Amino acid sequence: MGDSTVQNRVETSRVVGNVVQAGSIHQLTVVQVQGRCRIAGDADFVPLHKVTETFAIEHLGVQRSIATGAEHASVLPLYVRRRHDEELELAIEQAQARSVMKVLVADSSCGKTRALHEALRHLRPASRWRLWQPLSAERLLSVLGTNGLDPYTVLWLNESQLYLDGDRGERVGEELRRLLAGGNGPVLVLGTLWKDHHRRLTAHVTSPDADHHAQVRELLAGRCISVSDRFSDEELRRAAELSQCDGRLAEALRHSGGRITQYLAAGPLLVQRYEHAAPATRAVIEAAMDARRLGHGRDLPLSLLMEAAPDYMTDSEWNQVDENWKEQALAYATESLRGADGVLTFIRTRPGAAPHSQKHYRLADYLEQHGRETRNCWCPPASFWAAAIEHCTRSEDLEALAAAARDRLRLRTAAHLYGRLALAGDPAKAIHETGMMILLSGRLQLADSWFRLAATLGSTDAMRLVAGHTGDRHEAKRLYEQARNAGDKHAWQLLSKWHQDNGESDKARELVQLAADAGDAEALRSLAREAKEAQNWAAAEQYYRRAIAAGDTHAYLSLAGLIADRGDSARAEQTLHEAVEAGETVALEVLAHKAAEAGDWAHAEQLLRQATAHSARSDDADWLLAQMREQLGDAEGALHLSRMLASQDHADALFELALHHRRQGDLQSAEGYYRKAHAAGITEALTSAALMWVEDASDNSANRARAERLAHQAADAGDSTAMRILAVQALTTAQSAQARHLLTYGLEPDGTPTDSW
């Protein structure tokens, strides 16, 4: 790459960043630029015998334990073998001969990472294995996309969402599926996920365009193991035996109420430390909580936390802070808790990683989760956003926080953050996302200008958007081709449809065939459907099996349906069992449905529990059973199960009960359940509650006021859909000017309307 090209890209980022950051998104001057490329550093491949307890604490994410003051023979408490270890050890045994992936799923401090570290002891021969923890998703993609991983490598993906989220995550998912399906093994992939990350990454969506985790969902299917947050009676008995040799276990048994691992990781102490902190210190901690729950990476700049803190304090608290409040807050937050890590932990740059320009700290996992649960309805104050604009420098952090501001209708803040994203080196993404923000305000022509600029910057998303809305079919074709040549995974389908719509069916089919020959599973499924419509059963089955070979285990379900349609129910069921063996746990749900249709509810329940256990969704078996009863006409049985689950704060059941009461006309009860569903993790529940009151025709003015309050609360929590809908409805009323202003300029951090900018 020549010096002039590099200089051009830097200048482009600067110009675009300044345009967006200055708040000039309401006007646009197009400039011609190119994209950018960034390569992360590398980390060492560590021989397995060097992965000691100390190494695991310092490098792999295993948490330090509280100390009792007595001498202990080991750095970590003695390990208590638990139910999930059995399945993990089986995977380790399988990894001696073939590539295997297992991800442990549980809330914070439940022992996930420690369990993975203990499992490494069972790898044989240990001298042949080595461990690699990639520094980033980019570096992982770089290795997987070139020479891949050598046999006898443990790929360590602690906090797997860091690798599997977003656009890069889909590429990681695709490459890992290819790795696991290939013969260049054995490779052992080990990871961890919190429950909410797992649910988000594996959620099924009805619209393919909204399916942002298709590859990751397929990757995780059948490869997750649920870890309980409490020890079973048998596990407590084992812990009691070991506690005779380890005072830390003995103390945890006396005081934890079965939540042994959380106690050992100082979880309760961390919450107490936060709740008892002085106002200034509590403000710093809450700023860290908000940064993490809004998407900032684990490493938090100290300047971000300190500059964000003031508006978290009341006027009285702020007036009483000591001149040295920053030093005092940091000392309190970083103090070790009986040998375990404190609220904030200083992060030393790892070898091979780009050094931080300032000090960074990491919030304790347990408090991060506590913040997600207790602060999910709060929008951070103005000082938080100002500090983020000033002190965040990583593209990933700026993109996440800009999206969080946009989703809360804090549009001016989002524009500033997208400007910083452009300055940080990703102008294509910044311009595309700014265009999306303008599109949501209803200004289609201006949004199109921004999308066109993003397309010139190399954004394939923007290329597809412009192509889909342009009136020039030749331009649409050119943009679809440009996106396909840039590697966009959706572009070939859109280009094929373009040829079909323009009377070039042969060319359309040629594109599908080319994609199928390259191993594209969607193309293979398309050809299978085409063959099925032509009643070419043999060809359809062949295409489905090729899709399966390409890593699309979901194609088993389509294949089973094809075989069943031909009247061969026995072979169809056999195909579903093949799907289960391949990790496609949805096949178990299909088998359960068949059992329920035959009246064998006991077998159906058994199959559903097996399905949810394999998917780390063990608490969803009863919910799936309730849905099945509803589908088969047992509404009363379904409602009974939903009520039972709702009493246990099951999010989907709470949402279903809200819908039930809404259908019954009991809107007060419906709103209560919507609120509970939101607290349990369903983001759109408050929006549903707001729109419910708008749709009710009785007492219109009072209901609309109630809807507006709920819509505002939903926006503060990260879903501004209801506020936008209410504003659009108001465009035809006397409040049209205020509504247009809100859609265009959004809200201030405190929730009041923003002035024109």
Image: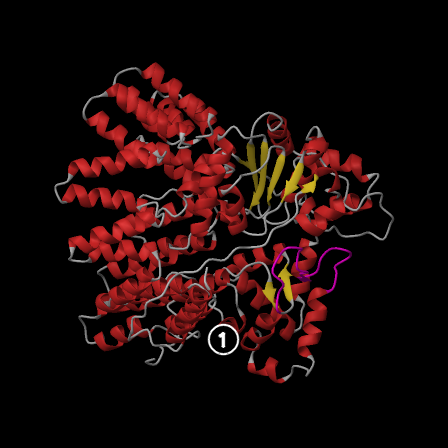
Q: Is residue 618 above or below residue 601?
A: below
Residue 707 appears anywhere in the view: no
* Region rendered in magenta: 335-357
- Residue 515: x and y in percent read 31, 37
Circle 1 residues within 10 Å: few <14, some 14–19, many ≥20: some
Secondary structure, magenta segment, majority class: loop
Q: Please, is residue 675 above or below residue 329 in the view?
A: above
Q: Which residue is at the far left?
A: 503
**Left or right of 493: which side holds 1?**
right
Q: Position of residue 643 (x, y in %)?
A: 43, 42
Q: Position of residue 356 (x, y in %)?
A: 62, 65
Describe the element under mark 1 as helix, strand or loop.
helix
Residue 335, quarter of picture: bottom right
Residue 749 seen anywhere in this rendered image of the structure: yes
In the rendered view, tell whether residue 476 sits above or below residue 91.
below
Q: Residue at x 64, y 55 (%)?
A: 352
Q: Quadrant of residue 546?
A: top left
Which residue is at a point 63% across and 65% down the rendered structure image?
360
Residue designated by label 1: 386
Which residue is at a point 47% across and 50% down the rendered structure image? 165
Quarter residue 595 falls in: top left
Quick one: 492 or 530, which is closer to the camera?
492
Where does the image place residue 71, in percent across and percent down from the top left?
A: 87, 48
Judge whether residue 352 is colored magenta. yes
